[in-house]
């Protein structure tokens, strides 16, 4: 069987998950429904999209998400090339490999090597949809306060935040909608789209850009650190050295080696993302918030997968290739403390907000399940739009 090149493999994955695109840039819902405060940037961005269309790697590639990833990789390469990342393991900066997106709803990306020295990074479209909607929920949970010089600041007072969330039940409804869209429909794009007020735009951008940059930087870090070249070689050495042992023992050694790779890629990706955000003018605490949001998002989606499988939602999800999101989050927090003593104050508040949202969600979910069981049904038996009506009607009644 012929081995596919990276572009051929990407085209095949895209063909299987959706087929050829016929993009009309102005006909996207995101453009049609864009609020006036964002439309002033539209002509310039549409020009960028038109240029990007000429560079698409396959006939199946959608231009909006490709243009986004292209910008992210450009910033990543800039901070590494300018020696702002001090890592002795980076001897030579490899070129950005072929990349693209596929119509999948999960929050994921992966780098693969279909043939020697021909790499491909594949992003799930759900990654961008989830990052966008989750960032809106998080940003909306903060309390806006005006400073004496008319600037907008965000209060980190937990009592104020909890009161604010109680007074604005739409925050919880968007959170519930997002999680159930992922669990029931398998794609965050099934959640209702919305534009928040203008004052939240900067915080949404900090969170969303940080999440997406971290994920892209993580996959690129595997290539930069030589993990794809080393893994198969080290596994063969491990297996041959344990001839008297079982294959299971060799697999355990491989698991720990792969976990080490993931942690190393996380740490380098954190360094890269921090530098990208610092270049934009944000301080270290704000720059770390998007990275933390990515970890919190992974934790939430692991919990939803557990719920779907009838398991304890808080049970850590561990697999052969990745440590749990909780473990990865703790390691990154330890690394962040080395950068600045008080860097975790904002993310501690952020994590408590997510805990509050999660506890409220679980109360609603248990109520919904009890109600459906009376009719011998589950959330998977009911059309999702009906579940959405329940979410939004319930929260409307609270106003």
Image (cartoon, rainbow, N blue to C red):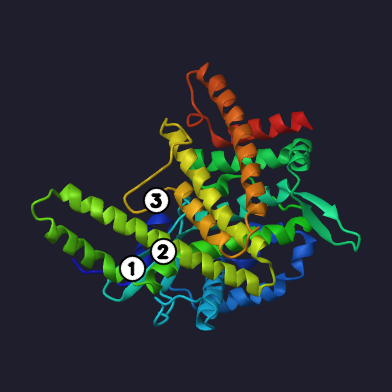
Q: CA distance from mark 3 to mark 1?
A: 16 Å
**Which residue is disc 2 drawn over?**
264
Answer above or below: position of 198 versus 158. below
- Front label number (2 vs 1): 2
Badge 2 or badge 1: first in the primary sequence: 1
Answer above or below: position of 111 versus 17. below
Q: Quadrant of the N terminus?
A: bottom left
Q: Secondary structure at mark 3?
A: loop
* Left or right relative to 229: residue 196: right
**Which residue is disc 1 drawn over?**
227
- Quick one: label 2, few (<14), some, or many (20+) residues within 10 Å? some
Question: Is the residue under label 1 in contact with that under label 2 (CB below 8 Å)?
Answer: yes
Residue at figure coordinates x 49%, y 23% from the top left: 377
- Quick one: label 3, few (<14), some, or many (20+) residues within 10 Å? some
Question: Is the residue under label 1 in contact with that under label 3 (CB below 8 Å)?
Answer: no
Visible residue check, residue 20: no
Residue at figure coordinates x 72%, y 40% from the top left: 170
Answer above or below: position of 87 versus 335. below
* Left or right relative to 189: residue 205: right
**Which residue is disc 3 drawn over?**
323
Residue 393, quarter of picture: top right
Give the percent coordinates (x, y) of residue 289.
Answer: 62, 57
Q: Quadrant of the C terminus?
A: top right
Q: Which mark is residue 129?
A: none
Badge 3 or badge 1: first in the primary sequence: 1
Residue at figure coordinates x 18%, y 47% from the top left: 248
- Quick one: label 1, few (<14), some, or many (20+) residues within 10 Å? some
Q: CA distance from mark 2 to mark 1?
A: 10 Å
Q: CA distance from mark 3 to mark 2?
A: 12 Å
Residue 33, quarter of picture: bottom right
The answer to which of 25 and 85 lies nearer the viewer is 85
């Amino acid at each position: 069987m012929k081995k596919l090149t990276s572009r051929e493999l990407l085209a095949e994955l895209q063909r299987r998950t959706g087929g050829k695109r016929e993009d009309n840039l102005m006909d996207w819902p995101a453009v049609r429904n864009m609020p006036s405060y964002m439309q002033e940037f539209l002509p310039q961005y549409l020009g960028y999209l038109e240029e990007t269309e000429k560079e698409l790697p396959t006939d199946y590639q959608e231009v909006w998400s490709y243009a986004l990833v292209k910008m992210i990789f450009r910033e990543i390469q800039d901070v590494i090339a300018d020696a702002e990342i001090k890592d002795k393991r980076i001897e030579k900066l490899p070129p950005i490999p072929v990349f693209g997106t596929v119509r999948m709803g999960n929050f994921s990306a992966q780098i693969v090597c279909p043939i020697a020295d021909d790499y491909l990074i594949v992003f799930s479209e759900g990654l961008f949809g989830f990052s966008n909607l989750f960032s809106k929920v998080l940003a909306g949970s903060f309390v806006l306060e005006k400073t004496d010089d008319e600037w907008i600041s965000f209060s980190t007072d937990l009592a104020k935040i909890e009161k604010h969330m109680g007074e604005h039940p739409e925050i919880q409804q968007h959170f519930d909608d997002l999680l159930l869209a992922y669990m029931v429909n398998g794609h965050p794009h099934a959640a209702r789209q919305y534009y928040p007020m203008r004052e939240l735009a900067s915080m949404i951008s900090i969170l969303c850009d940080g999440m997406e940059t971290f994920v892209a930087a993580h996959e690129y870090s595997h290539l930069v650190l030589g993990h794809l070249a080393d893994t198969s070689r080290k596994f063969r050495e491990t297996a041959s050295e344990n001839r008297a042992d079982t294959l299971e023992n060799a697999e355990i050694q491989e698991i720990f080696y792969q976990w080490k790779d993931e942690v190393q890629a996380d740490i380098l990706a954190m360094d890269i993302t921090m530098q990208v955000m610092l270049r934009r003018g944000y301080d270290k605490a704000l720059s770390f918030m998007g990275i933390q949001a990515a970890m919190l998002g992974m934790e939430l989606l692991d919990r939803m997968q557990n719920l779907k499988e009838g398991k304890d939602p808080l049970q850590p999800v561990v697999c052969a290739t990745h440590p749990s999101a909780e473990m990865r989050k703790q390691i990154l927090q330890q690394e962040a403390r080395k950068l600045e003593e008080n860097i975790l104050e904002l993310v501690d508040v952020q994590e408590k907000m997510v805990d509050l949202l999660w506890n409220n969600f679980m109360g609603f979910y248990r109520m919904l399940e009890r109600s459906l069981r009376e009719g011998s049904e589950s959330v998977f038996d009911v059309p999702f739009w009906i579940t959405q009506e329940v979410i939004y009607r319930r929260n409307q009644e609270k106003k």
